[in-house]
Image (cartoon, grey):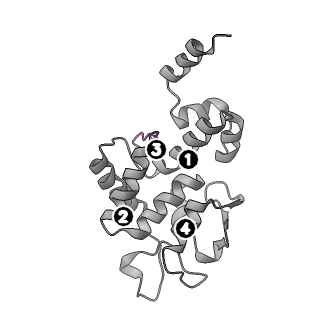
Amino acid sequence: MEFVKPIKNREQIEQMKDAIGAEGKYRERVLFILGINSGLRISDLLNLRWKDVSGSSVTVKEQKTGKVKRFPLNDACVEALRSIPKGKPAEYIFVSHSNRNGSESKPWTRQYIWQILNQAAKAVGLEEVGTHTLRKTFAYHVFTATKNLTLVQKLLNHSSPATTLRYIGIEQEELNACYTTLNL
């Protein structure tokens, strides 16, 4: 498995949104926005159905943990979801193009999203981007905004703070900066 990083620069996040949208990939842009604002794993994002979204909140049973997770959507997510036509309650939000008119609705694949993200990343000049970048970006920005490692650890269901630090890409330079800037 390839190692991917969070997108730490907010300007690059906006550039990614624009690059995905510029290709006419509006639902893909919505998935990107939901991913970086919710911290859901790609498997859970891809399996979201309209019935999972109630007003401005989401309820999803996480595939990896089997736990039910309910959380509010921020304004960016609500606006993004409103930009696409709402389907039937049991229909996937991110329906595969090849099955939109078929009898069986299927979600997009991880591989499809990986391709979309990598095309956009190349256009923006980013490397080490993949489907997990969305979740890592969410975690990194929650941590930088709150400086609360325990909170991020709980949001991600990680077993240890060390795992969470590695996951969000807190690197040695940032750790060293803590020592040099504290000056008590």
Q: Amino acid at mark 1?
A: Phe
- Mark 1 or 2 closer to N-term? 2
Find residue 49 and report its image quarter. bottom right
Residue 47 image position (x, y, % from top left): 55, 68
Secondary element under disc 2, as helix, strand or loop, is helix
Q: Amino acid at mark 4?
A: Glu
| Circle 3 residue | 10
- Mark 3 or 2 closer to N-term? 3
Find residue 9 and report its image quarter. top left
- Mark 1 or 3 closer to N-term? 3
Q: Is residue 70 left or right of residue 46?
A: right
Q: Amino acid at mark 2?
A: Gly
| Circle 2 residue | 21
| Circle 4 residue | 79
Q: Is residue 170 left or right of residue 3?
A: right
| Circle 1 residue | 138
Between disc 1 and disc 2, the foreground one is 2
Residue 146: which numbered mark, if any? none
- Mark 1 or 4 closer to N-term? 4
Can you say which quadrant of the picture contains the C terminus? top right
Between disc 1 and disc 4, the foreground one is 4
Q: Nearer the viewer, residue 75 or 19?
A: 75
Secondary element under disc 1, as helix, strand or loop, is helix
- Camera sees residue 47: no
